[in-house]
Amino acid sequence: MFKKITLPFIKVFLPFIASVALAQIEKAPNRAEGEYANRTIIRGVTLINSTGAPPIGPIDIVIEKNKIAQIKQVGYPGVPIDPKSRPKLNEGDKELDCTGMYLMPGFIDMHGHIGGKQQGTPAEYVFKLWLGHGITTIRDPSAGNGLDWTLDQKRRSEKNEITAPRIKAYTAFGMGSDKAITTPEEARQWVRDNAAKGADGIKFFGAEPAVFRAALEENKKIGLRSACHHAQLEVARMNVLATAKAGLTSMEHWYGLPEALFDERTLQNYPADYNYSNEQNRFEEAGKLWKQSAEPGSAKWNQVMDELLKIDFTLDPTFNIYEANRDLMMARRAEWHDDYTLPAVWRFYGPSRISHGSYWLNWGTEQEVAWKENYQIWMRFVNEYKNKGGRVTTGSDSGFIYQLYGFAYIRELELLREAGFHPLEVIRAATIKGAEALGMADQIGSVEVGKLADFVITEENPLANLKTLYGTGAIKVNDKNEVTRVGGVKYTVKDGVIYDAKKLLSDVRKMVSDAKTKENFEITQPGIPQKRASKVQGAEKN
């Protein structure tokens, strides 16, 4: 989520993106807090895979170094397991008893910004929230801390020198250039240079059509992938269908899709006093956009969908990042904010005319109703696209609009369920579909022999209740009529390294607690951050 984007963004903000030090946050400390062994056996899980297979167990999984070496069914539900049927534990091996637990492939967040200086989020905070929710791979769209910074964290994560997910770096188009990109040849040269620097792909916001097409064609020729937030400043010239035909491999959010579906207009119905730089305008009117597009099920609707399917195009909807638009109070007072949201992040979320995604200047019932109607149409398109064989992935875009790293990703899973996905289809979108979109399906995304050992292990069955994946767990009344908390990820395994997910989240809670103590901070009113009243008379509120 970035403000003032596309080609004007490249021209106006070039000094900013060239001086990436302004955006950089504190890197993750050089330590790995997971456990690793040359050979590890995970015992007794029920496997929830992403291949379309139903759950099966009990299963033992053997990891040799960082790869899956064996997957073995070792018994039947309700029947004691014969030890002779299990893979043998050798001297020096690690054994992880997960009897009765559930194991899935590691989650992939296709829209994972590694925080920003404006939000005040150290990388360790962001990484631990992700890993604490089972996210083992992220795509950083736009590499907002600078490509060199992101690639450094990527390399250290690959070596497991830091506690962090696997990182794929998609550079914002134009980043690092000392001048505006205004010609097709300049675009092609930037794309070649970007690949040479080690980027995994490109994040676009839009551009002049000839420049945009040249960049997409060159990127595809090189063999890299791409994503686009089709910003309103350029979407009228190149919507999703146009960019997909030019070589774009995935879209973010929903911008550009309703515009491709227009059949009784060519432009969004902007009011006369609309100003894109006023985010209250921008997001309020965006909530009315889907109703301006073709009727669901119409010839135009099906034509656009079929063309995107033919291209093998990827939708990464990020439903969660706009959910505050349909229920601001719910998003603002989500229970995890008290313990897991840093004071600096909370301040960034609050109403502001400057901070992106903080446009709560006059948000009310009418805006929320419009957005609820928006979601109904948007979700129908995404669900139908999936049903026709289209690729839908899972991304969160956390750090904006009251959406917090890790927690927002689990909320995205719930929203895919609301859209009509079966729980197994939700897990598939969160794993193998993301791996396919990244070009990594031969390495991650499913639990299969030869692939990297990336797993999410839980004590509760997520297919029965996705809320049990939240770090705060889910409320449940036990047989003694006691209200308890159940769930949360038990272990996250990334590249063969086993992390205690609850310990990672405990570390985050301490970071937040320490920051609040240091700043004398508490949330005294919903959405309005203030400092704790000081014992010193006359102390000012923040």
Image (cartoon, rainbow, N blue to C red):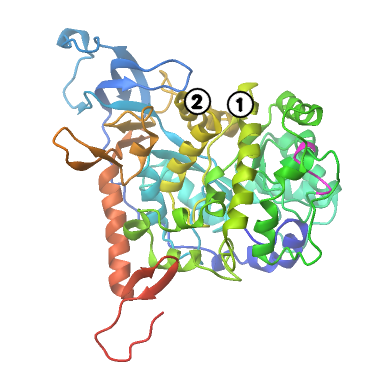
- Tell me the SS state at disc 1: helix
**Count of number-bearing discs:** 2
Tell me the residue at 81%/27% (across/down): 299
Disc number for residue 425: 2
Please tell me whether residue 524 is drawn above or below residue 484 in the rendered image.
below
Query: Where is the N terminus found, in terms of image quarters?
Result: bottom right
Q: Can residue 1 be seen in this view?
A: no
Mark 2 and mark 1: Cα distance apart in space: 9 Å
Instruction: Check disc 1 and report the residue beneath it.
Output: 386
Helix, strand or loop for disc 2: helix
Tell me: 16 left or right of 516: right
Q: In this view of the protein, which residue sits in the foreground, 35 or 415?
A: 415
Label 1 crowding class (10 Å Cα cut-off): few <14, some 14-19, many 20+? some
First to last magenta residue range: 236-241
Tell me: residue 441, above or below residue 88.
Answer: below
Q: Residue 79 — which label?
A: none
Lower sequence index among marks 2 and 1:
1
Q: Does the magenta stretch include residue 333?
A: no
In the rendered image, the quadrant that contains the C terminus is bottom left
